[in-house]
Amino acid sequence: MFISHILTNMHLTNVVCSGSLCCRIDLKKLCYELDNAIYDSKNFPGLIWKHRRISGSCLVFSNGVIHCNGKADSFMDGVRRLRRYARYLQKLRFSVQLKEVKVMTASAFHCLKAVLDIKALVKETDCIYEPELFPMAVLRRNGIVFNCFYTGKIIIAGIKSMNQIDDTVLPTLLELNLYTRKKD
């Protein structure tokens, strides 16, 4: 029951997906055909696109690489969003074919039931805590970064797969629960 509470209390906040459109894209032409698109080759080599009905935002590069990010409930929602952007390009008569789709990274948010005893956490684990710079402890496990605040809020960055959630994130959240105490 305790693990199911952690699963329901952890929320994905951002999923970044990438893919290949298998063709070159004329970004100037594409920018003229889209609403809510920005292309300035002097400042950034890609086209920045935010579709009104497709949530999140998309980057399209002239070599056919496409990146998509935004709030999602699962990794599949992020991939689905990327596919919707590619499908929209097909409707504009670009001969795109989405391949090599992968989740690049994801971020999540978790809130512990009590405040975090950062002093005990720093003393007993390998986390970094510099209160003069920022009021949080940074804990790194298997390439995933846990930003732990005194209030019990935890921001998790660098998740690349569901296996990492099972193997690294959940055990670390269980461990962090050991360092909680009642509010003063």
Image (cartoon, rainbow, N blue to C red):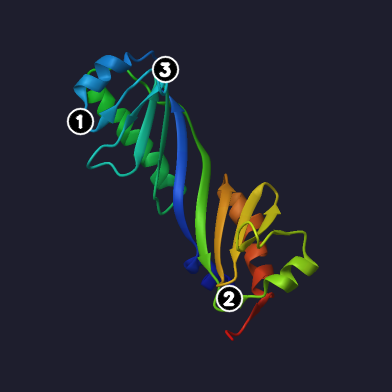
Residue 58 x %, y %:
36, 34
Q: Residue at x 54, y 77 (%)?
A: 113
Q: Residue at x 43, y 45 (%)?
A: 76
Q: Which residue is mark 2?
A: 2
Going by the picture, which residue comes out furthest to the front? 132
Count up the numbered dots.
3
Residue 35 image label: 1
Q: Which residue is mark 3?
A: 22
- Mark 1 or mark 3, whichever is nearer to me: 1
Q: Residue at x 69, y 59 (%)?
A: 130
Nearer the N terminus, badge 2 or badge 1? 2
Q: Amino acid under label 3?
A: Cys
The quadrant the C terminus occupies is bottom right
Q: Amino acid under label 2?
A: Phe
Residue 14 relative to residue 151: left or right: left
Residue 102 x %, y %:
50, 35
Quarter-of-image position of residue 92: top left
- Mark 2 or mark 1, whichever is nearer to me: 1
Around disc 2, counting alpha carbons within 10 Å, would you say few (fewer than 14), some (14 to 19), or many (20 or more)?
A: few
The CA span between labels 2 and 1 is 47 Å
The CA span between labels 1 and 3 is 23 Å
Residue 124 x %, y %:
79, 68
Q: Amino acid under label 1?
A: Asp
Residue 143 relative to residue 69: left or right: right
